[in-house]
Amino acid sequence: MAASAKNLAVLDQSNNGDWTVVLPRRGRQRKTFPKLRNREDQRTWSPTDQANDTIRESKLLQKMEICIKKVESSQFYRTLIDELGTTPVLESLNKALASESKMEMVIYGVGSIENYENPRLQLSLAILLKRKFSWIGSLEVFDPILSATECRVMESFGCSILSVNEEGRRCAQKATLFFMPHCEAGLYNNLLQENWTVELLNHVVLFGNSFEIYGQFVSEFKSSPVVDSAKYILASRKFTREIKIKTLSDDYFGAFHDSSWHFFSPVSPTELQFTDL
């Protein structure tokens, strides 16, 4: 049975490219993957460093626990939770869920949680959302730069590490929340291309860079290669409900600035046909 708006609004305590718009990163690495040409290019993956360093792991675990508590007690987090309870968001979540009671969460491009605070803040938010909302199911994570230590720490917080580099090409056969703050445009483009049907796009919920800002960038700096490399992002805007989040303070600006919730609702295959952008 479909999850009701009431169920979505209740906090659940039982569930523990090739181009980019240059934005301030505040000391963190760029999130990028080489663009794959087809599904056969997807390869199995594992961390290159397999050393078991318990001291290093313990330090990182402590860093994550501190970061999770920081986010949970912040005005930023309370505001974001309130926004998830608004009618537009609840309507869109219910539509994506359809007959499902849960949607899985897939995190691409999380970055190094050991070396940078912004990835820790982003992962902390994802973990807190899973803990709070019963409609979020499994939590899968991938970034090709992850170390074995980072993978083990993420697993201790209930995350599953993907063993295949999907390059964003996950087919959303059921409701799926893609958590992708500050990824490269090419990764969003891959995701949309893989799901470019009416049925599949209606299953996709995306937390990531504002598509409106991509549109503004392209309008200001018209370039054929740029438009082509982001064509699915630009084409999707006509049937996308975008709800921007509020970062409120400098503590969270670097990790979440210009981020939005995106809900896709094409109703006809004709909406997926490409025209001049």
Image (tube, rainbow, N blue to C red):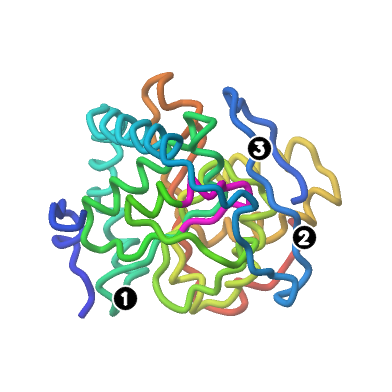
Circle 2 or circle 3, nearest the eye: 3
Q: In the figure, residue 36 lies in which quadrant?
A: bottom right
Q: Amino acid at mark 2?
A: Asp
Looking at marks 2 and 1 on the same chain, the residue that comes earlier in the sequence is marked by 1
* Boundaries of the magenta span: 141-151
Label 3 crowd (10 A; few <14 / some 14-19 / many >=20): some
Question: Horizontal placement of 75 versus 226: left or right?
Answer: left
Position of residue 32 measured from the top left corner of the image (x, y, whole percent): 68, 47
The quarter of the rendered structure image containing the N terminus is: bottom left
* Residue 107 vertical position relative to residue 103 in the rendered view, above or below: above
Label 1 crowd (10 A; few <14 / some 14-19 / many >=20): some
Position of residue 155 measured from the top left corner of the image (x, y, whole percent): 38, 54
Give the camera-side residue of 232 and 180. Answer: 180
Residue under pointer 3: 30
Tag 3, which secondary structure? loop
* Residue 11 vertical position relative to residue 26 in the rendered view, above or below: below
Q: Residue at x 34, y 61 (%)?
A: 92
Position of residue 190 measured from the top left corner of the image (x, y, whole percent): 66, 62
Tag 1, which secondary structure? loop
Looking at marks 2 and 3 on the same chain, the residue that comes earlier in the sequence is marked by 3
The quarter of the rendered structure image containing the C terminus is: bottom right
Q: Residue at x 42, y 61 (%)?
A: 160
Q: Amino acid at mark 3?
A: Arg
Evaluate if marks 2 and 1 touch, with contact meaning CB atoms under 8 Å apart: no
Q: Residue at x 41, y 76 (%)?
A: 174
Q: Amino acid at mark 1?
A: Ala
Q: In the figure, residue 191 lies in which quadrant?
A: bottom right
- Disc 2 and disc 3: Cα gap in Å? 30 Å
- Disc 2 and disc 1: Cα gap in Å? 33 Å
Q: Which mark is residue 276?
A: 2
Residue under pointer 1: 98
